[in-house]
Image (tube, rainbow, N blue to C red):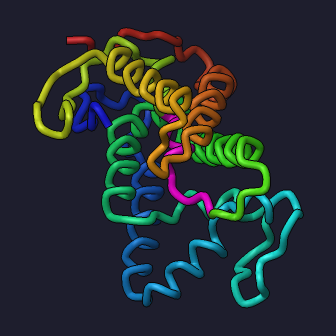
Amino acid sequence: MVFVPLYDDNHLKFIPFQATTWALIAINVAVFIWQQTLGQDAVSAFDLGAGVIPASLLGDVKLPPELVLTRPAFTLITYMFVHGSIWHLLGNMAFLWVFGDNVEDAMGSIRFLFFYLLCGVAAALAHTYANLGSQAPLIGASGATAGVIAAYLMLYPRVRIWVLAFARIPLRLAAWFVISSWIVLQIVFLMMSVDGGTALWAHIGGFAAGLILIPIFKRPGQPLFAAGRPE
């Protein structure tokens, strides 16, 4: 990850508090803390039961009954709230924390929740059809947060964001530059077939969904490509 977002100076205009963003973060953190109370075998079983397994989702294989937590279709939702490590969790929540509040503000809290979930579903489907036959579980909020990132790019490309470059150097950069760098990195890794365990197609699917859905979910009169607070 080239840039880790820390903070943006882009104040809320319509809602008093980013309730949905906070709730999503709280649920993700709570699930991760609960997972830490389990043994390793139980964690692995939970990942299989709650994660999206392409071969299971498409009906090619069935999980053993003891691993089934819900119907395969429902894992399109549950997988978003499961993370494999503290860094996996913190990375996704950092992006949701910085970008989610203003996207929620531009939509309203309820519409933002549906937007987030739909982006996550699109991400999982993109991953599934790019990995036909895979029996490895997809977990994590990165696909849904990719949709949030796309929405922020469409809404506030010129807003300046504090980031840590290469996890070391604090910089204040325009949102369009930070997000474009993230997009380029996904494409480069995909073309090089280097994912390091990262579900790149989920990122791309979620991002594409965000671009498509933001004009539908934004408030009436909310402009795209607004200036926000560029300085």
Whether residue 130 is in magenta: the answer is no
**Residue 116: % across, % down:** 58, 44
Residue 3: percent from left, percent from top = 27, 32
Does residue 121 sit above or below 4 in this rendering?
below
Task: Using residue 50 as the reference point, say whether residue 35 is left or right of it.
Answer: left
Residue at the right extreme, as displayed: 59
Where residue 20 sits: x, y (%)? 48, 50
Verify whether residue 139 appears in magenta.
yes
Labels in figure, total: 0
- Residue that appears at 43% across and 88% down: 38
Residue that extends furthest to the left in the rendered view of this protein = 169
Residue 157 shows in this picture: yes
**Above/below status of 225 relative to 6:** above
Residue 111 appears in view: no
User: Residue 40 falls in which quadrant of the image?
Assistant: bottom left
Residue at left offset 72%, top offset 57%: 134
Give residue 181's quadrant in the image.
top left
Q: Name the residue rendered at 75%, 75% in the picture.
A: 70
Taking depth in this image into account, of 189 and 182 the one nearest to the observer is: 189
Q: Is residue 27 left or right of residue 130?
A: left
Q: Which residues are magenta?
A: 137-148
**Residue drawn at 40 percent across, 14 percent down:** 157
How far across and how far down the image is residue 229, in percent?
Answer: 27, 15
Residue 20 as seen in the image, left or right of residue 111: left
- Residues 77 and 3: in front is 3
- Tell me the quarter of the image containing the N terminus: top left
Quadrant containing the C terminus is: top left
Q: Is residue 227 left or right of residue 189?
A: left
